[in-house]
Image (cartoon, rainbow, N blue to C red):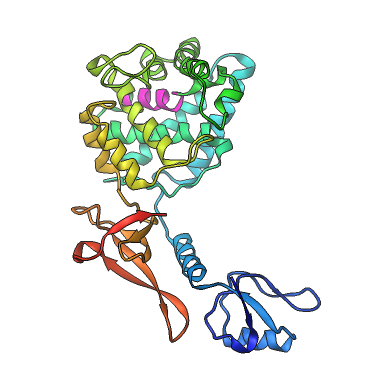
Amino acid sequence: MQRTLIEDLKPGVTIAQDVHNSNGIMLAPRGAVFGAELIKRAENNGIKEIFIEDEEQAEQSAIISFQKSLNVDNIICENTKIQAQKQIRKTMLKFNSIGKIQFDRINSMIDNIIEQLFSKKDIVLTLSRLRSIDNYTYEHSLNVCVLSLILGIDLNMDKQTLKILGMGSIMHDVGKLLVPEDILKKPSRLTGMEFEEIKKHTDYGYAILLNSNISEEAAAIALNHHEKYDGSGYNNKLSGEGIPVLSRIVAVADVYDAMSNDRVYKKRMQPNLVYKEIACQSGRHFDASIIEKFIRHLSIYPVGTGVILNTNHKGVVIAQNNFLPESPIIRVFKKDFRSSKYVGVDINLSQTKHLHIKGTF
């Protein structure tokens, strides 16, 4: 941010602070681009100087404005997402008063989600969603359900099996209702005893669901979703085909969504790093046949991702290259010195030999 005299301003600069006249009336908000007419209005109101963004800030403003303008398709419609999160919250809060889960509305909600997913083809997951940490449990539950159902559909499961998968996945963390909240929301590393308490949520969840007259197959998802393919998970050290297939699916969806979003104790990972971590755990923590299906739906650099090139230019991903996922089409913002504005230039990284992505933001 730099202080600049009105007489030295050129059209196209971006305002770094709100501009008010002597009566407190706002003439221009922060982020507005000064044009000739606005400069004249400021002069007429006796404004002698303003704060404008420096080059880096102006570039960042152009990028953020463009990211907000992108229309990224939702996997399920926004109204379904909002209503589902509310219903999950109500269902879990009601458990505290009656000791059982009531599934009628959850059942119809899962039917709706399954129908929406069947209407989509070649779903590619995006990481553009932002979430409140306070609502993490409810949003995470829905995301894991949707991700699991995408995998179930890809594995050609029938609708009855998908219903079981949907119910078990959306309730996979229900056992956390019985874990002390100070442990669940602890912002630092857990002690050994605290982690042992956390691990009990799988047994708690299994018992809650069976007590609520859910099918054993669905309840087993809550019990087994932290088991690992190599036998290093918890609580029963199951391995390989000994882990029910529905639990193996939810294990992948659970870890993917957790790594992709902010949690109380850990910031989200960048999309390319999530992709790499998931792929690297194939055959170890996760069933390789499920990972093979899952990564077909992942994008290394989803639309809307901010990227940094080896030239240090910043850009935003606007489209994918299916055969070269590490080289998407991006929009880089460069200053037009005639107008002083930052304008977008589209670059297909698959068609350039000297440009590549070195980082994300």
Q: Position of residue 70 (x, y in %)?
A: 42, 60
Q: Could you tell me what secondary structure mostly forms the magenta stretch?
A: helix
Residue 245 is left or right of residue 199, and the answer is left
Q: Nearer the viewer, residue 36 or 150?
A: 36
Front one among 190 and 246 = 190
Q: Is residue 113 in sight in this rendering?
A: no
Q: Where does residue 128 sit, x and y in percent of width and height?
A: 43, 50
Q: Nearer the viewer, residue 217 or 161?
A: 217
Q: Judge whether 342 appears above or below 67 on screen.
A: below
Q: What is the quadrant of residue 220 in the picture? A: top left
Q: Residue at x 24, y 42 (%)?
A: 296
- Picture residue at 33% right of the left edge, 30% below the top: 252
Residue 354: x and y, percent? Answer: 21, 66
Magenta residues, as a range? 161-172
Quadrant location of the C terminus?
bottom left
* Residue 157, quarter of picture: top left
Percent across and percent down for residue 214 are 44, 15
Instruction: Determine whether 145 is above or below 209 in the image.
Output: below
Judged from this view, the residue extending furthest toward the right is 23
Q: Residue at x 20, y 66 (%)?
A: 352
Q: Is residue 170 magenta?
A: yes
The quarter in which the N terminus is drawn is: bottom right
Q: Is residue 319 above or below residue 207?
A: below
